Image (cartoon, rainbow, N blue to C red):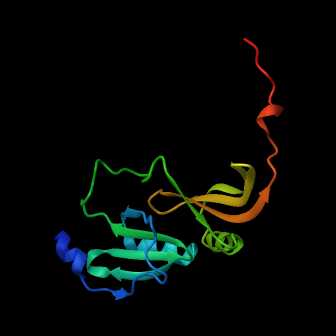
């Protein structure tokens, strides 16, 4: 299939699917990827995303997984703000909340996909409580860092500022 270069033609090119059920997310990242097919295998087959709609001639797909939305577009030079070198997305990680990590970990292990950070329990202060999650990090085929997490609930904070040793000058 011939890839369209004109931005207007790309945006209006035919595809399959429909807008995401429940509407569009308020924030949906669009990732430039080097090979859309390879990225779709990772995001859909391993992480469990589904293609809501796509435009094959534009090399574009809109993905959903629960409330998480992601757009993938094969690199075409549009909106390039500078050189794009691997790993892409330096300085950012995309946290995606899921019901269960184990099926995703099993899918990644089955194809020997390396983890960036092994699963661990993490607690983050969120105002008057700590929110817990079991999380791990993995890089997609272009090096974008993805943090997948399952909710562990909340607990009282273990660290309180008045517990810290005082400093005298």
Give the left or right position of residue 108, taking residue 50 as reference. Answer: right
User: Which residue is situated farthest in the front direction here?
Assistant: 128
Image-quadrant location for residue 61: bottom left
Is residue 14 at all visible to an observer of this figure?
Answer: yes
Q: Position of residue 168 (x, y in %)?
A: 76, 14
Give the residue at x 18% y 76%. Answer: 9
Front residue (pair 165, 162): 162
Q: Quadrant of the C terminus?
A: top right
Q: Quadrant of the N terminus?
A: bottom left
Front residue (pair 158, 72): 158
Q: Position of residue 115 (x, y in %)?
A: 62, 59
Give the residue at x 31% y 74%. Answer: 59
User: Which residue is situated farthest in the top direction here?
Assistant: 169
Q: Position of residue 8 (x, y in %)?
A: 18, 73
Give the left or right position of residue 26, taking residue 48 as reference. Answer: left
Give the left or right position of residue 113, taking residue 43 as reference. Answer: right
Front residue (pair 25, 30): 25
**Total marks in image:** 0
Front residue (pair 1, 130): 130
Give the residue at x 47% y 63%. Answer: 141
Give the left or right position of residue 20, taking residue 1 as reference. Answer: right
Give the residue at x 68% y 75%. Answer: 103
The relative height of residue 116 versus residue 47 in the rendered view (above or below) is: above
Image-quadrant location for residue 80: bottom left
Q: Position of residue 45 (x, y in %)?
A: 54, 78
Is residue 5 at all visible to an observer of this figure?
Answer: no
């Amino acid at each position: 299939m011939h890839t369209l270069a004109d931005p207007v033609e790309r945006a209006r090119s035919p595809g399959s699917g429909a807008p995401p059920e429940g509407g569009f997310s308020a924030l949906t990242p669009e990732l430039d990827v080097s090979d859309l097919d390879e990225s779709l295998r990772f995001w859909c087959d391993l992480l469990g995303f589904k293609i809501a709609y796509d435009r094959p001639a534009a090399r574009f797909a809109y993905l959903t997984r629960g409330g998480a939305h992601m757009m993938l577009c094969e690199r075409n030079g549009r909106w390039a703000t500078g050189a794009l070198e691997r790993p892409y997305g330096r300085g950012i990680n995309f946290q995606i909340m899921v019901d269960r990590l184990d099926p995703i970990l099993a899918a990644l292990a089955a194809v020997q996909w390396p983890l960036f950070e092994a699963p661990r329990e993490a607690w983050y202060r969120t105002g008057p409580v700590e929110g817990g999650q079991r999380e791990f990090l993995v890089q997609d085929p272009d090096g974008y860092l993805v943090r997948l997490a399952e909710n562990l609930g909340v607990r009282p904070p273990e660290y309180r500022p008045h517990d810290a040793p005082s400093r005298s000058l």
